[in-house]
Each structure stands twice: as C-alpha cells, then as structure tokens.
Image: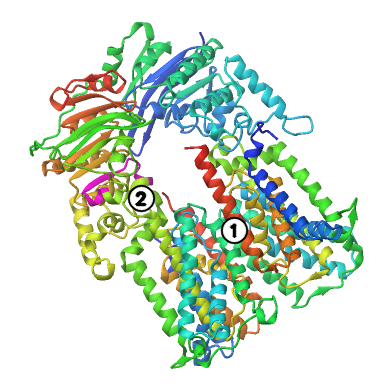
Amino acid sequence: MNMSRGQFFRKREFTVLGLIVVLAIIFSLTTERFLSVSNLTNLLVQLAGTAISAIGMTMVIITGGIDVSVGSILGMSSVVAGKLLMANFPVVVILGAAIATGLLFGFFNGSLVAYGKIPPIIVTLGMLNIIRSLLFQLLGGRWISGVPPAIRVIGLGKWLGIPISMWIALILILFFTYFLNSRPLGRAIYAVGNNIEAARVSGVNLTRTILFVYALTGMLVGFAGLIYVARTGIVQTNTGTGFELEVIAAVVLGGTSILGGKGTIVGSLLGAFLVGIIKNGMVLLNVPALSEGLVIGALILISVVIDVVRARGERI
Amino acid sequence: METVLEVRGVSKSFGGVQALKGVNFALRSGEVHALVGENGAGKSTLIKIISGALLPDRGEIFYLDQPVTIDSPRKAQEMGISTVYQEPLVYNELSAVENIFLGREIRKPWGSIDWKAQEEKTKALFASLGLPYHFLREPMGELSVGLQQLVLIAKALAYESKVIIFDEPTAILTEHETERLFDIITKLRMRGVGIIYISHRLEEIFRIADRVTVMRDGEVRGVFSIGEVNRDRIVELMAGRLLVEAIERKGKKSDAPLLVVENLSKRGRFSDVSFQVFPGEILGFFGLVGSGRTDIVQTIFGLMRQDSGNIIYQGKTVHFSSPEEAMQSDIAYLPEDRKVQGLFPILGVGYNISITFLKEILGSFGVVREKKERNRGEEYVRRLNIKTPNLKTKVYSLSGGNQQKVVIAKWLGTTPRVLILDEPTRGVDVASKSEIHNLIAHLADEGLGIVMISSELPEILKMSDRIVVMHEGKITGVFDRAEATAEDVIRAATGERLISVER
Amino acid sequence: MKSVFNQIVENRMLFLLILFLILFVIFSVGVRGFFTFYNLTNMTQYGVELGLLALAEMLVILSGGGGIDLSVGSMLTLVAMVIGVLIGRAGLNPSLSIIIGILAGLGMGCVNGILVSYLRILPLIVTLASLYIYKSLALIVAVDPRFGPNPMPVSNFPENFYFVGQFRVGGIPFQVLFIFLPVILILYFLLEKHAFGRYLYGVGSNEKAALFSGISVTRVRLVVYTLAGLLSALSGWIITSRIASARPDIGLGYEMQAITIAVLGGVNIKGGEGTIGGVVLGVAIITLLYNGMQLAGIHQIWQLGSLGLVLVGSVFLNQLLLARRKF
C-alpha cells in the first residue's frame, strides 16, 4: 500500500479493529464459550460468505455505485448449486455453475448500468425482485435439504484449525487487495469513483471498469452461494433475503465512502467481522438476537458521525 | 529557438458569437509566452482549442512542425501538451504520486504497478526542480492548492510535455508559493519547455515572460518581446479604443446611503472593504474572479459570515444569517452561476419566477393563489420580453438570454430596495444583453440601489454611476463615472492602488 | 412533428395510464372473475398498505440529495407492534394506542430527518442504520415476558379494532375510502397547491438554487422524512387491523417494493421530478397486476418478478427520453 506513516492510525480500519479487539476481550471475559474452538470456528464459517461478497461490493461502492441484488443472486446460486448437488454432479461442475450463475446476473446488472446508463440502485432493485421470482420458480416452492456430504467440506471442513471457507475468503481478499492496489484496472476503479471526468482524460475505459465491478460482484456472490449451501445444507425460497443489507453494512462500517472513491477490502472484512462478532457475542450473552440490529444500526451511525466530526477537524 | 506549437488562422464561434477570428499564435521552445486580454477577449477559447477541449471551426494547428488535430484533452496530453488549470482536475482520495501516473502506470514485468519506481521517478522529478517531496504519499485532496499545482507540473513533466499551459496559476497562491512557481517556470524554460502563461497580473508578466501576446475581441492585437513594450502599451491594447457610451439615466441619486459596508473582512477572502450604496445609483464592481467581489456580496446576502466589520442597512447594523432574512429586508441577489445557483432548470418558467415571492401570494392554509401567480408571472414575461411558449415551459429549454431574464424576473418579484447583480449578462446574447442593461438603468431610475458585479469592462463602464475595483480581496480603486477611464480601471484591477475618489 | 410513440414516451402519466388500461383490458377479457364488482373493489385494499409506503418514498426521493428511505418497512413493523402490544397486552384503549403508535412513527421519521438534514449524513446510510434499529426495537417490543424471551405476535384485539382494515362502505374497503383517498388528496394539495410543494420540488431539483432563493433546505428535508414516518405508521396500523395480527416481521422487504413503485410512477431517483398522480397510477398498476396474475393462477412468486421487470423496463424507456433531452 501507498500510505505514509501515521496515516494508518487515522484510518477507519483502525477504529474498527480496535472495536473488534475490545468486544472480543469483553466477550471472552463475560462468557465462557466465546474463546472456545467450536464457537470461533462457527463465527468464521458464518463470516466467510459475507466477507467474500463484500469484496465485490466494496469495489462497486468505490465506483460510486451500489448493488442491492446480491441477496437474490446469493439465493439463486444456492438453488443452482443445491439442485446440481442433489443430482450428484461432480463438485467442479457445481462450482462452475454457481459462479457462472452469479456472473450472468452480475454481467446483466453491469451492462444496464454501464451501457444503459440507468442508476445502479434502480437496476439492482429491479434485479433483486426479478431474480427472486426466478428462484421461486426454479425451486417450485419446495426446499432443498439433505445435501450430500461431499460438498459440505467447503462449508464445514477445516485446515490448520481454520474453516476451509475462511481460507478461501482470505485468499480472495489477499488477491483482490493486491488487485485493487497494484493493477491498473484496480486503480481505475478508484479513479472512476474519485473524478469521472479526470478518469476519462486519463484514458480510463469507464464502461469496461463499471461492467467489471458488477460482473465480479456477481461471480463472488455466486461463489458465496455455494458456500452457503455447503455450510447449511439447506436452500429455501427466502435464502439470501436481506443479505444485501448485511454486506452493505459491512462495507460502510469498514470505511468505504458511499459517495465513492475511497475504501479498502480489508476494511470491509473488518466491518464484516465486527458485525459477526456482535451477533455471536450477543447470542452467547443470551441477549437474544433481538437487539442485534440495534447495535449494528447504532454502530453504522456512530462510525459515520465520527467521520463527519473528523473531517471537520482536519479540513476547513 | 525553434517553434514548438503554432496556431494559424484559427476561428471559433458559439451560437453566432465569434469568439476567435483568424488567430495566429506561435510558441517557441524554451520561452515563456504570456497571453493577456480582458475577459471575453478569447484567451480561454484559444487555450481550450490548444488543449483539446474544443475543436476550431477553421484554421490549423502545427505541433513540432506537423499539422495535428487535437480532438480530446487526452490526446493533447499524450502529444505533450499539458494544462495546469486554476482549479485542477484531480483525484482527491488518491496519493500525489498516483495522480501523476494514473492511466499510464509504470509496471513490473508481470503487470503490477511498480509503486517504488513511480515514487522514485516522481522524487527525481521534484528533486530536479529543487522541490520538497515529503508529501508524495498524501491524498491529493489534503494538499494545498499550491502543492497540487506542483504535482500537476510534475505530471506534465512525466508526460514529457513540450508545451505547458498555465491558466492564471497564481490567482489563488500565497506569495511564497508564487515565488516558488516562478522559480520552477524558469527551470522549465531552461529545459526547453514552451510555456503559455495566462495572467491578469501584468507585473508578473514583466517578471517572467519572454514575449507577450495581447488579445481583444477574439483577435490578436499585438505580439511583443517583453523588452520592447511597457505596461501602458499593453493596457492600451487590452482596453482598445474603448469608446463606451454611458447608458442614459433619468433618475437622481439620493444623498442618504441605503447600504453601508464598513471595514468588512473575512480571512482569506477579503479585507477592510468599505463602500456605500445609494438609492437610485448603479455601483459597478470590477475585479477578477477570485478578487473577493462575490464573497463580499454573498456575505451581505447572508450566505457567509464576516470575521469583522459592519453592514449597515437603512441606518441599522444588520446580520443576516440566511438569504431568507436578507430577502425579508428587501435585499435581492442574482448569483453569478445561472444554472447552478439561479435556476431550477427542470421546472417551469412560472415556478422559477414565483419561488422568491411565494409568501406574498399565499391564501389561507398556505395555498398558492395560482391566478395571482400566473398574473405576476405573465407580467414579468411581458415586461422583460421573455420568449417562452408559456409559463409551464421548462427553463432548460430556453435560450441563455431568456434564462437570465427569468432569474432577473425572479428577483424583481421580491420588490427589492437593494438589488445585487453578479454577472448579470454572462453567456447572454447581444440583444438580450442590451435589454437587460436598459432594464437595470430603469430600475435605478426608479430608486433601487443596484450593485452590479461584472468582469466585462465595457459593461462596467457603460452601466455604472460609480465603479469600485477590487484586487486580491482589497479595494484598489473607486471612480466616478465621469472620470473613469478603461486604462485606470484595468490598472487598479491588476493591482495598482488608485483610489481617486474616496467617499 | 411528434409521433404518437414519442408522446407516450415523453409523457409519463400517459404512458402509465396506457399501461394500466392495457392490463385492465387484458385481465377483463382473459381472466375469469376479474371484472366483477366484488373483485374490483376488494383488490383496492391490497394497494393501500404498499401505496402509503410508495407515497412516503416519493416524498423523500423528491427531496433530492440522495433521498431514499430504507427504513419504511421497519417503521411500519415497529408501529404495528406498538399498537398491538398496547391494545392486546397492556389493554389500553384502542384509539389511544393507535394515536401513540402513529406518534411513534412520526418520531422515527423525525429522527431520520434530523440525521439527514442537520447532521448531513447521507440518507442511504441513515436509513440503513435506522432500518436495523427500528426492526430490532420491534422485536424487543414483541417480547412477551410471560411467555419467555422470544418475540411473539399479538392477535387478541377487540372487535372494534378491525374496522379500519376489514370494514366496507358500499362495498369499498374502509381504508381505501377513509385513509388512502384522503392521504392522496392531502398530498396532492400539499404538492400541487401549497407552498410546501413548491419548496420541495425546488430543493429536490436544485439544492443550491433553493438555498440562494431563500428556501430552508434543512427544514424541507426534515418535514419529508417525518411525513414518511407518518405514512409508514398509517400503513402499519391498517395492516395490523386487516390481518388481525401484529407480527414483528410484518414489514420485511416492503422498502424495496415501495421504492420500486415510486420509481415506476415516474419519480426521478435524483430528486425534484415526479407527481403524485404518477405514483398513484404506479400503485394502481401494481395492484392490478398482482390481482390479475393471482386470478389467472400465476403463482404469487411472480408478483415480485413482474414488479422488477416493469421497473427496469420503464426506467429504460425513460432513459431513452433523457438521452434526447438537451440541457
């Protein structure tokens, strides 16, 4: 990364990391189970899908866009994966199909935004509904359950004590962090979000960049869908409903500006972690899931207000 | 010295207005070539053509002795023609280094961006100019304008530019930053870069330029080596034989001032500004963009707050904390940017006119009395001769002149006592312009106190009873209409202190 | 000369009206049981709840500055739970409970409005946060300590609570006649006849010009978010009465449908453009579509899909029109 010393501590990532550490300490002191292997594994397994999807969402938001269709895409790819699993297709085929499903819808979103010049919120809002209907149709109102164990290793298996899905998430995060930081296309994503006019003058291919972020988001969410099936073994008609808000919350908490131009994948991962740890800790504390939203909502507001106050302090 | 860039017989017109008429211009490598002229003289059109933002209607451009077509800013940059704008186009959240290299990164064999190499190269560039480079990793948005400018100069060098255009680079720089910039320009010249330098500050031009081209009314009026010309000659050419006939006025100025501004200051914007506005007079405000004229009137109108000084209106000290309050005291302000600040383009003509005086035409329960609204709207359309199919027509579909009349109508509707007009005829066709001028004179005759800001000297000379000239936040001249000459006003606006008539 | 097609594309109301008529004719001819007095009056009740939310979205989107309200579904739910708990568990007087519930909605909208207009936080973020917060509060309110720590629906209402959601006057549902129509008329009055409407369109179409014209941008935004809370509250009350139950998950996903209908009705997502008539037509079209499809035996699942298709299709058409408009 291209960052001066001292800057790190002013970043949102640092605040979020601090919060995570504080919460982790609180939870490990107040509950017995928080630090147990099974709990931590559980926490990581649940996080993996959100973290992977947040990679794409971060890029979309950096360009100044948004994708609210990711919940439906996740549901759709779980259905596709689930169906193929039940028909005993080989894992490679299923993997390909899940990713292709996501890519298809992501590409469609991206085309409408980049070429159709329709505002992203409208495109993805429409697709959210359309994909959900297609998904219902495909499922025919039934559930998929009893997924064969072969695939579940992706969801529940472990290597060196860390769930495989989390390994995959970490590898993807590393790769795309490298991509965003060190590849011209990655930097073009920031350029588009910072100053679209300047980007045009610099020779950035605007339509290609925009198409790319939506298509990539689709692919990653498609993969997250597969992980979902592998983890839970169940696909329902409402699988993935509300997932988009969870991913957006993680990204926003992680310091990505909703106005575009600024943000990191690592920040989004931390944002996802923060949300995950709160959910997990509250369950352990027997604060039922009820007030989870209260805490998440309050955190979103607090972190943004801190930014507003800071911005006032730093610049005039 | 060889000629690096040559423009031959270039013309350009916008909707019937001839902005450039057969302009010839040549830039040698290793020279600083100043381009001067009043606003509207055609400088910026010429620059836009050279930098690829506009295509000429006629004429040719030669770059390194080859005829070229520069059809985009990107192409200009790739060719080696860079422009450092007053308000630069930057990526605020990205580092200085990245602002230089985005779009043409230095890459490693496997395609990654070579940050280290980019930074080294930038450091080398800065070092070769004798500049500090501790800020290279900071986000561009957190740098001062002066530093941002340095980054853009470095970017021009990274593109190995043979031509660098500076568009009023010192307008918003501190003195120290200005000195540093001159230093760099001298170094660039020694490297053989051709520099086009646009500035309204004549003293700067005599310090750093080798040659100067004076433009007026879309034509080149003279090209001189700096040694063979003096300041007076340049001012004379800029002003031309400016025979501006003052507009006919009937009313009489009253003796008691309506609005008094006393020692008004705001840090970084304007300082110690005092003037008076009398009922029945037009007070012209002349000065360059950034001279503080707009900031002052916006302070009066409640859009900003002064650090010190008083505004006395009708004998009482006032503090308006919002435009709403200023409007309640019958002050109206027609802002300079019609599309952004003045109009609701996607709404109707009638809507745009009535929005400022809606409170006067409300019935019970806050209902807008539409008949009254329509009558008032039609009245203004007639009185100002606004050409529109009807009151429901969306404003964006009108011509610039008619749009401006809509904005004027909107403010006349508030029946103000003080009417502040910020560039009332910018981007307006000739016919509408003279209609607007007549209207302004008529309003003053009726007893309004009018403050008229303009960057157009002829307009100022034609309309004003008195002229206040500003330079860098200070008043540098106050003239009565009878004794004001174009040369004096230009001198004051370029920084000479010439307060001839104090009131 | 303008072709008929151009006319239709350029006049949103005309376009929606034609879409409405086409659907109406198709369903009347092709779907058994559609063109009956009972069906035509009965189906209107389903448009009310979503319709009120769509009107709420219309107001906030109109106000510009990235205006959007993701929290309408959560506000609806919380109001439903407050009313439900006050009547069903605390045994409070129904009228009083309803008033408290509606005031609660007003308050929630007001909080959104303060955060958006005075603290200048982007509406998407404010309402994303309040979506979570209000939803969570609804769950907490729904907990009945007598039956353990889990949120529970409330269903024991007195008979007189059902009038708003279940009664009919001359065959027409009560809530259509006495709530939805009055709300439409009042909003029409506010937007088209009242000074407030002028200010709202001004703020939404050009915030800066509004400021320079002496309009208080913050006040206008505060009012629309508060109104959005009020409309969501009305919707929560009606839905509780109609289904005779207050459930803590009742408003799930409504925000997306409401935004969709508002945009379908011609509200420009960037603010400042859109009419109440358009949104009402949007509501009518969606109600018709849902009902017709249901009667035609098309599975309910296609309701959402058709909504999405109509949205993307109509905005795409709009985009073609915008491309032609010069500034």
Nearest to the observer: residue B426 or residue C201 = C201
Q: Nearer the viewer, residue B396 or C280?
A: C280
Q: According to the image, label 2 marks what residue?
A: C211
Q: Is residue C266 visible?
A: no
Say the numbered circle drawn on residue A270: none
Q: Are marks 1 and 2 on the same chain?
A: no
Name the image quarter holding the C terminus of chain B.
top left
Instruction: Report the side of C278 relative to A64 (left or right).
Output: left
Tags 1 and 2 in contact by the CB under 8 Å rule?
A: no
Image quadrant assignment for residue A179: top right
How many numbered callouts?
Answer: 2
Mark sitting on residue A298: 1
Query: In this picture, is C167 found above or below B75?
Result: below
The correct choice, above or below, for B254 with respect to C50 in the image is above
Q: Nearer the viewer, residue B216 or C85?
A: C85
The residue that appears at 73% across and 42% down in the rendered structure is A177
Bounds of the magenta span?
A: B326-340
* Foreground residue among C139 and B128: C139
Name the side, left or right, on which A60 lies relative to B366.
Answer: right
Q: Residue furthest front?
A: A29
Mark 1–mark 2 Cα distance, whole angstroms, equals: 31 Å
**Residue C280 against residue B171 in the figure, above or below:** below
Badge 2, how many Cα within 10 Å: few under 14, some, many 20+? many
Q: Secondary structure at mark 2?
A: helix
Residue B187: x and y in percent read 53, 12
Its colouring scheme is rainbow
Residue B13 seen in the figure:
yes
Q: Nearer the viewer, mark 1 or mark 2?
A: 1
Instruction: Pinpoint residue A9: horizontal percent, then vertical percent.
Output: 65, 38
